[in-house]
Image (tube, rainbow, N blue to C red):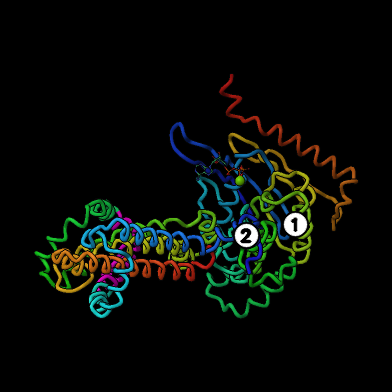
């Protein structure tokens, strides 16, 4: 059985003429240790799907199981990184990373070493006692990745974690994420608007379509690892990007919209 | 150290010339103040205006020095009652703010009432308080409390509700409970609002104690102002007013400083 089992999951928002079908009967299996990206046009329900996997909201229909348990509320085995770093400005970097430890009422002293190791991993150890306001956007996002990893979760859910970064930092962070992933062997679900980034990082790219939000196509990315910037010269890499772009473009034309027009 | 932040500010306010540096420092407002005093002094001396109407600043200052004991004796109860009412307002206001924000039932029932009462011109109830609580300390402290209380409800309440939506989502995703969210997110987010409320409450508390002493008192700086009016002693009146202003400013800056220390991340 896959680690994450999404079966016939639907999510509706609002009522009457403001009703939105954010997700329509989504089925997705994610294997333990795999890196899966979700791509698709804005509003196709990527964030919604992540929110449901996090247990922050309940699906309107269907079921999500993680490690064979139905998801009912936020779970310790999941770490998460959002589009914004969401660091508390009144806490130092170290204290921000230890926040999940504190929430679980675990002894903070024991996790201090681990927090510093994680900071080493992202090259920010000497900023441990700094406040978020003293860091750049990219540095903050790296801190939030450390926070997601502090409890050593099996699963990492990331919603456009690099979208606030400039292109160069973004590429660096991709490499870093690949390195962290290969070292720790976690299951990663990664939402991005960058097809290149998705192909670069993933074992599998799931393309979602609009109106209603649904999965339209899946692509296996069987490119060799570890991958470096050189991969851009590989034909298969570019073909995949091209195919996925086409798939996303087709998914933008909603099913509902078509029916209304006829 | 916040090198980034200070560098940004430094760039904007980079002192270019001697004049700019002068205007940017404390020397400039001090100069303006001294010049105004000199102008006042000169006007009184040259125009021959009666001291009953407007005494010279030098006369007021020397009066303050000569009568320092009388002034301090009267300043003490004013400060004490003002602070007492203020502290009660801060504690009570924050407690109500917590109840209002944490319990929907209480919010539904009481918040409209709080906002309604907040709109009453509170000074107008001063005589009523004398009727209820007599002419003593209780009436004065009650008025200070009543006048300072409402900003101490409204401001912390909006602070407790002002938590950044992203932080809230993050905390929930990491499994934070309601009470954990309260202590780790709501309370720190409310701190800047609490101090803003305290600044407003403090200026109102000073007005409250003066009005209370106008209405009923046998001591205090507010009483001294009324007493001096009866004697047509304008110098004494101005001396009391100046001392009141100094006290008010001192209390305000104490809060400002405390706020800067507590809300250290907002510099
Ligand atoms: N809390 C909510 N209330 C009402 N509608 C919502 C809510 N959250 C999401 N939606 C709707 O659900 C749909 C999917 O939204 P979602 O945020 O999941 O899209 P997305 O794929 O993450 O888009 P983007 O790429 O722009 O982040 C949208 O039509 C949105 O309007
Ligand atoms: Mg989204």
Residue A8: which disc?
Answer: none
How far from the left and from the top, in percent, is residue A23?
Answer: 57, 41
Between residue B33 and residue B7, name the one nearer to us. B33
Classify 10 Å Cα crowding around label 1: few (below 14), some (14-19), many (20 and above). many
Could one spot residue A144 in this view of the protein? no
Residue at 13% x, 65% y is B230
Between residue B230 and residue B211, name the one nearer to us. B230
Q: Quadrant of the C terminus of chain A?
A: top right
Residue B198 appears in which quarter of the rendering? bottom left
Residue behind mark 1: A173
Between residue A119 and residue A231, name the one nearer to us. A119
Q: Are marks 2 and 1 in contact (CB under 8 Å)?
A: no
Residue B18: which disc?
Answer: 2
Q: Is A63 placed above or below A87 here?
A: above
Residue A90 falls within the magenta-colored stretch: no
The kind of secondary structure the magenta stretch mainly shows is helix
Q: Chain of mark 1?
A: A
Q: Quadrant of the N terminus of chain A?
A: bottom right
Between residue A258 and residue B247, name the one nearer to us. B247
How far from the left and from the top, in percent, is residue A113?
Answer: 67, 78
* Range shown magenta: B81-107
Camera-near label (2 vs 1) is 2
Secondary structure at badge 1 equals helix
How far from the left and from the top, in percent, is residue B124?
Answer: 17, 55
Residue at 84% x, 40% y is A239
Residue at 62% x, 35% y is A210
Separation of residues labelled 2 and 1 (CA atoms)? 47 Å
Could one spot residue A40 in this view of the protein? yes
Residue B236 shown left or right of residue B186 in the figure: left
Residue B262 shown left or right of residue B235 in the figure: right
């Amino acid at each position: 059985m896959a680690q994450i089992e999404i079966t016939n999951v639907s999510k509706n928002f609002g009522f009457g003429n403001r009703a939105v079908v954010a997700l329509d009967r989504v089925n997705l299996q994610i294997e333990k240790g795999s890196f899966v990206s979700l791509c698709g046009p804005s509003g196709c329900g990527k964030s919604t799907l992540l929110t449901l996997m996090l247990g922050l909201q309940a699906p309107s229909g269907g079921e999500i199981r993680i490690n064979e348990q139905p998801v009912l509320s936020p779970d310790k085995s999941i770490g998460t990184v959002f589009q914004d770093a969401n660091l508390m400005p009144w806490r130092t970097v170290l204290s921000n990373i230890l926040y999940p430890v504190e929430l679980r009422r675990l002894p903070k002293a024991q996790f201090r070493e681990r927090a510093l190791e994680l900071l080493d991993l992202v090259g920010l150890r000497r900023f441990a006692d700094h406040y978020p306001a003293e860091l750049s956007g990219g540095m903050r996002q790296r801190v939030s990745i450390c926070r997601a990893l502090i409890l050593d979760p099996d699963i990492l859910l990331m919603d456009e974690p690099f979208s606030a970064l400039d292109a160069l930092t973004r590429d660096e962070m991709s490499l870093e994420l690949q390195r962290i992933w290969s070292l720790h062997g976690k299951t990663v679900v990664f939402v991005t608007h960058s097809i290149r980034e998705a192909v670069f990082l993933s074992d599998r790219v799931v393309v979602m379509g609009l109106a209603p939000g649904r999965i339209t196509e899946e692509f296996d990315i069987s490119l060799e690892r570890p991958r470096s910037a050189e991969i851009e010269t590989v034909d298969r890499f570019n073909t995949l990007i091209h195919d996925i772009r086409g798939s996303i473009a087709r998914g933008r034309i909603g099913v509902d919209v078509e029916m209304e027009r006829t | 150290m916040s090198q980034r932040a200070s560098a940004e500010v430094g760039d904007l306010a980079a002192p270019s010339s001697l004049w700019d540096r002068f205007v940017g420092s404390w020397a400039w407002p001090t100069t303006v103040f001294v010049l105004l005093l000199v102008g006042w002094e000169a006007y009184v001396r040259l125009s021959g205006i009666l001291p009953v109407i407007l005494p010279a600043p030098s006369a007021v200052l020397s009066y303050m020095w000569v009568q320092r004991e009388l002034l301090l004796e009267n300043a003490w109860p004013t400060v004490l009652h003002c602070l007492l009412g203020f502290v009660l307002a801060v504690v009570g206001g924050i407690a109500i703010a917590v109840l209002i924000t944490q319990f929907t039932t209480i919010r539904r029932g009481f918040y409209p009432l709080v906002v309604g009462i907040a709109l009453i011109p509170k000074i107008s109830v001063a005589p009523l308080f004398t009727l209820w609580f007599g002419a003593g300390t209780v009436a004065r402290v009650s008025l200070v409390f009543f006048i300072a209380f409402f900003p101490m409800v409204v401001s912390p309440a909006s602070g407790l509700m002002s938590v950044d939506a992203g932080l809230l989502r993050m905390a929930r995703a990491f499994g934070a409970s309601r009470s954990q969210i309260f202590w780790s997110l709501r309370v720190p987010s409310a701190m800047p609002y609490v101090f803003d409320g305290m600044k407003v409450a403090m200026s109102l508390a000073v007005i409250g104690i003066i009005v209370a002493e106008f209405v009923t008192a046998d001591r205090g700086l507010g009483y001294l102002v009324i007493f001096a009016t009866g004697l047509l002693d304008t110098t004494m009146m101005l001396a009391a007013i100046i001392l009141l202003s100094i006290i008010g400013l001192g209390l305000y800056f104490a809060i400002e400083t405390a706020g800067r220390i507590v809300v250290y991340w907002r510099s």
